[in-house]
Image (cartoon, helix red, strand yellow):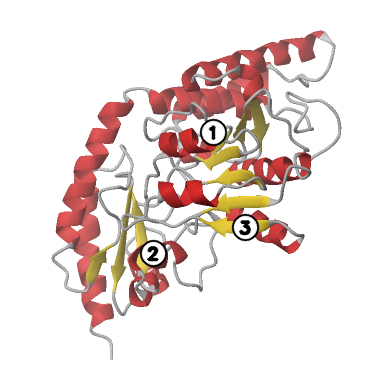
Amino acid sequence: MIYLDYSSTTKPNDEVLDSFIKCSNEFIGNPNSLHTLGVKARNIIDIATKQIADLLNIKGNEIIYTSGSSESNNLAIKGICEKYKNRGRHIITTKLEHSSISAPLKYLNEIGYIIDYVKLDENGQVDLNDLESLINDNTILVTIGAVNSEIGILQPIEKIANIVSKYPKCFFHSDMTQAIGKININLDKVDLVSFSAHKFYGIKGVGVLIKREKIELVPLIHGGKSTSNYRSGTPALPLVVSMSKALRLALTNLDEKIKYIYELNRYLKSRLMVFDKVKINSNDYCIPHILNVSILGVKPETMLHALNKYNIYISTKSACSSSNSKSEAVYELTKDEKKANSSIRISLSHLTTKSELDEFIKSFSVCYEELTNLK
């Protein structure tokens, strides 16, 4: 098996699984309970929370545990808009966002919120002058993802945060699902940050919304205090503990991992560029973990299934996107319908080997010849 879909999900690290099992067996109490077992469980979750906070240089009380990035994004967007709706009903975003951003924004638009899309430059990054021109007295939220999940474009988050910070009525939320645990990124001045453990070798079903302590939200899930006033429910202690372990491991030797993945990306790109109908969509402003290409005239799903026969696994788009539509992200970047209708995403990891990429190219070449010669 050759797995090249790490941006969809990652296999949990063995040490992470060990932490999950040990915690499940040894700390059976509900962290919300007042008896001895509950207190022990609460102490363990507090230790895990402190570790996550220290790793990300934030405060422990700024962490809200969720089921994953989709919930975190919905809580951030809907929670801000409901709490601060008397300030205004204007939101700014981009056309590169994940469906867990675009869907709640569509819902809010239907109930009276105004959504504006900031212009992008030729590299797919936010036009900072246009962003500032869009902010007005009615703007309460700017939500811009750090890394696009389909192409890998990295946004200038610090510059965006500096602009938004000049407007005290407006908050800045960033979906960092494809960034946390993969690249070095500064969270200073970002008001709300979403991420999920399963993107950095943690277990599915747990994520975080970082919310700065002076900001308030209206919860999505009501029912009493848990680890936070903003998300009720029994704390998923084993998941939280395993996520803290996954994050620590992901950030260990991070610069070395990034350098290695850059080398893999360059090698793979050079091998793919020899195919006439392959067009590279990812550019120099993308993180190396994602390489998006189009095979002109070949449907993405067709190539995916062809490679699947060789036990090679890639993606057409973000795993949460509709499979039968064009890539809006590729179209937004290239303005080319053919590229947008024929793009695939190859996502890499520090676990990927050069020999795996050679085997991928070998099988890809066979599939390419078969599919591009179909009449």
x%, y% of residue 328?
Answer: 46, 66
Front-most of 194 and 364? 194
Relative side of 284 to 330, left or right: left
**Quarter of image, res 61:** top right
x%, y% of residue 51?
Answer: 54, 16
- Which amino acid lies under the numbered mark 1 shown in the image of this protein? Lys
Residue visible at 67% across and 54% down?
Answer: 104
Residue 166: numbered disc:
1
Residue visible at 37% across and 34% down?
Answer: 183
Residue visible at 48% across and 37% down?
Answer: 163
x%, y% of residue 4?
Answer: 35, 52
Q: Earlier in the sequence, mark 3 or mark 1?
A: 3
- Dot 3 falls on a residue whose secondary structure is strand
Residue 188 against residue 270 in the figure, above or below: above
Residue visible at 71% across and 56% down?
Answer: 113
- Dot 2 falls on a residue whose secondary structure is helix
Residue 234 against residue 89 in the figure, above or below: above
Query: Which mark is in front, 3 or 1?
Result: 1
Q: Which residue is mark 3?
A: 115
Q: Residues within 10 Å of mark 2 (few under 14, many from 20)?
A: many
Query: Which mark is in front, 3 or 2?
Result: 3
Callout 3 touching callout 1 (CB < 8 Å): no
Real-space Cα separation, disc 3 to disc 2, in angstroms:
21 Å
Residue 55 against residue 221 in the figure, above or below: above
- Which amino acid lies under the numbered mark 2 shown in the image of this protein? Val
**Quarter of image, res 72:** top right
Real-space Cα separation, disc 3 to disc 1, in angstroms:
20 Å
Residue 330: numbered disc:
2
Residue 1 seen in the figure: no
Residue 229 against residue 340 in the figure, above or below: above
For the image, the number of numbered tags is 3
